[in-house]
Image (tube, rainbow, N blue to C red):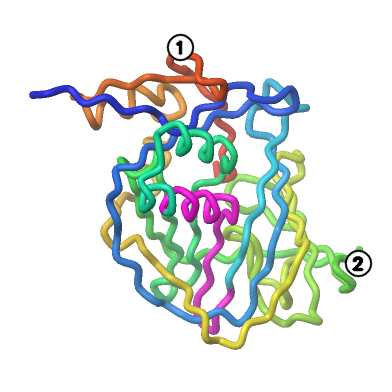
Amino acid sequence: MKTRHILLLALSLAATAAQAQMNIKISTGQTFRKDTIDHKVLTVQYGLNALTDLSKPDARMQETLRLDIGRQASRFYSYTAFVADSVLAADMANGASSELIAQHANQYQSQWSEQTFKNYPAGRVTTLDELAGDICRLRCEEPAEKPRWTLTQDTLTLLGYRCTRATTQFKGRQWSAWYTTDIPVSEGPWKICGLPGLILKAEDDEGHYRFTADGLEQSHGTEPILFGGKDYQPVDRKQYDKMQKRFAADPVGFITGIMPNVKITVRDNHGNKTKNPKDTPYNPIER
């Protein structure tokens, strides 16, 4: 069988002094059907500040994330990844060179690949993820679990809204969240929810993950919330976590295990060949 050669579109190792990061993405051009599951009534934009490499506490990840809230379901995703996918789709449609595609991939790097759909299907939480882009797309569906909150008297003002602090032990971390009853929507970033108002800030007590709202946009209920994961590989939570760990331990080995006839060239963001990464930083939000 003929061996194919794939250039990893984006791989950055210690690309900046402030942050060591790795981003591998392969595009096969495969598309998946997207279904409308609800319509947006409110979009919240959050800034994520996260520590993904515990050995480098000063190298923190920054990402722009969005929460699209409908009347029944919600979608939480990386806006950075959304822009990157849009640029890649345009490049592919326009027949852009591999050099330009790689340039854009480095320009629009996203470190948050998960999409979280709350209450879809009803009473469930569905997580979609891509390991190395198109070649391994996972769908993990679980029963919805609301945190058990302890309310406090602490307050904070965010985006002009008076917020109250609440705490909980949830998904392996101790969380503090600030919510506002002025927006009576029981929603928040990632899987965090269940308070009598919208959560505008959430952080764990170790300071590894911090979500802070920096924008709100109301919608008229005409723009769809799309779900494109029906054809993704279904896995349970244990399988999902196991595959994430395998990928972090040996990204290239993970890829060649799925595509054994593919030859992979790894390059840094200057275009120079580099060694295959091993034991990449792994500090998942859920543990």
Q: Position of residue 274 (x, y in %)?
A: 48, 13
The quarter holding residue 215 reads bottom right
Task: Find out whether residue 65 is within the magenta segment.
Answer: no
Is label 2 in a helix, a strand or a loop?
strand
Amino acid type for the residue under numbered disc 2 = Thr
Query: Which residue in the structure is indicated by mark 1?
Result: 275
Q: Position of residue 139 (x, y in %)?
A: 35, 54
Is residue 203 among what the camera can see?
A: yes
The quarter holding residue 53 reads top right
Is residue 111 among what the camera can see?
A: no
For the point 79% across and 79% down, the residue is 181
- Magenta residues? 69-89
Residue nearer the viewer, 4 or 189: 4
Q: Position of residue 148 (x, y in %)?
A: 65, 64
In the rendered image, the residue lying farthest to the left is 1
Q: Position of residue 80 (x, y in %)?
A: 59, 51
Amino acid type for the residue under numbered disc 1 = Lys
Is label 1 in a helix, a strand or a loop?
loop
Query: Which residue in the structure is indicated by mark 2?
Result: 157
- N-terminal-most mark, 2 or 1: 2
Q: Is residue 144 above or below residue 243?
A: below
Residue nearer the viewer, 168 or 275: 275
